[in-house]
Image (spheres, rainbow, N blue to C red):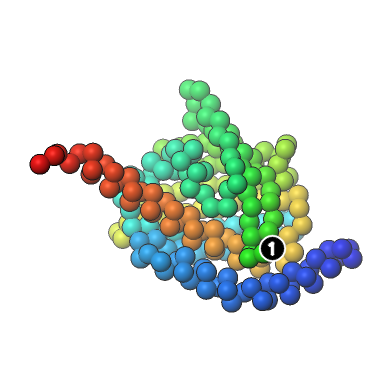
């Protein structure tokens, strides 16, 4: 490890240790502020320079409503946490969409901004498959997939991805696991609240005046 990376790592350990308790409390708040949305699991595995990420979230929302969110890439990206800006280009007469995200991920005061580009294939029933585009992004390679599953208690979204970032991640699995759990919790709440608001708006439109 180079000296500047060692300095960064030492500084990170100190800051991370002080922020862990607060961050853990934040995660608990995000996952328990509503019984309608929860993180079932979120894991990260590192193999060399490749990181494999998986999470599953459960929503108390109708499966068709959730599928509509994932089938509309613009809508899904707008709900994603930590996105500073984004651009979605839907290909005419195609089930493909090019997405560019500028994300800013933080563990309290420690932040990292990065650009991610993906080309999505939009399948039936809200299934999405993405292929990372290396040119102009901070990833060498990568791929992702979203899957919507009907659940007896609502709807589950399963996500898995593998990626090779161009930037160094100190204590990779530990840091990314922490970030992924918080990200999944915030996304679960965002989608659940969005679906609930849409349902209330639809009821309001259909309600006949007395």
Looking at the image, residue 149 lies above or below residue 121: below
Report x, y in % for residue 84: 60, 46
Query: Within the image, what quadrant is residue 140 found in?
Result: top right
The residue depicted at 38 percent of the width and 53 percent of the height is 193
* Extreme residue in the right direction: 3
- Label 1 crowding class (10 Å Cα cut-off): few <14, some 14-19, many 20+? few
Nearer the observer, 195 or 98: 195
Report x, y in % for residue 59: 37, 57
Report x, y in % for residue 49: 74, 56
| Left or right of 85 in this view: 76 | left
Pointer 1 residue: 110
Q: Can I make out residue 38 in this image?
A: yes
Nearer the observer, 141 or 109: 109
The residue depicted at 47 percent of the width and 65 percent of the height is 30
| Left or right of 199 in this view: 72 | right
| Left or right of 64 in this view: 159 | right
The residue depicted at 64 percent of the width and 40 percent of the height is 117
Report x, y in % for residue 6: 84, 68
The residue depicted at 52 percent of the width and 69 percent of the height is 26
Nearer the observer, 104 or 146: 104
| Left or right of 122 in this view: 174 | right
* Extreme residue in the top direction: 93
SS under mark 1: strand
For the N terminus, the image quarter is bottom right
For the C terminus, the image quarter is top left
Q: Can I make out residue 131 in this image?
A: no
* Extreme residue in the left direction: 210
State how many labels appear. Answer: 1
Nearer the observer, 140 or 182: 182
Query: Within the image, what quadrant is residue 154 found in?
Result: bottom left
């Amino acid at each position: 490890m180079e000296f500047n990376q060692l300095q960064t790592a030492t500084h990170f350990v100190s800051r991370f240790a002080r922020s862990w308790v607060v961050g853990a409390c934040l995660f608990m708040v995000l996952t328990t502020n509503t019984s309608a949305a929860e993180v079932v699991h979120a894991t990260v595995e590192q193999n060399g320079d490749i990181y494999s990420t998986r999470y599953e979230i459960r929503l108390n929302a109708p499966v068709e409503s959730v599928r509509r969110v994932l089938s509309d890439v613009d809508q899904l990206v707008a709900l994603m946490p930590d996105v500073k800006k984004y651009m979605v280009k839907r290909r005419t007469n195609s089930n493909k969409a090019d997405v560019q995200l500028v994300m800013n991920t933080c563990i309290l005061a420690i932040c990292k901004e990065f650009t991610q580009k993906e080309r999505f294939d939009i399948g039936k029933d809200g299934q999405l498959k993405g292929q990372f585009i290396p040119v102009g992004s901070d990833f060498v390679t990568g791929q992702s997939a979203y899957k919507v599953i009907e659940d007896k208690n609502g709807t589950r979204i399963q996500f898995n991805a593998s990626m090779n970032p161009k930037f160094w991640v100190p204590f990779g699995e530990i840091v990314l696991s922490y970030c992924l759990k918080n990200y999944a919790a915030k996304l679960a709440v965002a989608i659940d609240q969005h679906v609930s608001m849409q349902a209330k708006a639809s009821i309001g439109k259909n309600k006949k005046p007395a």
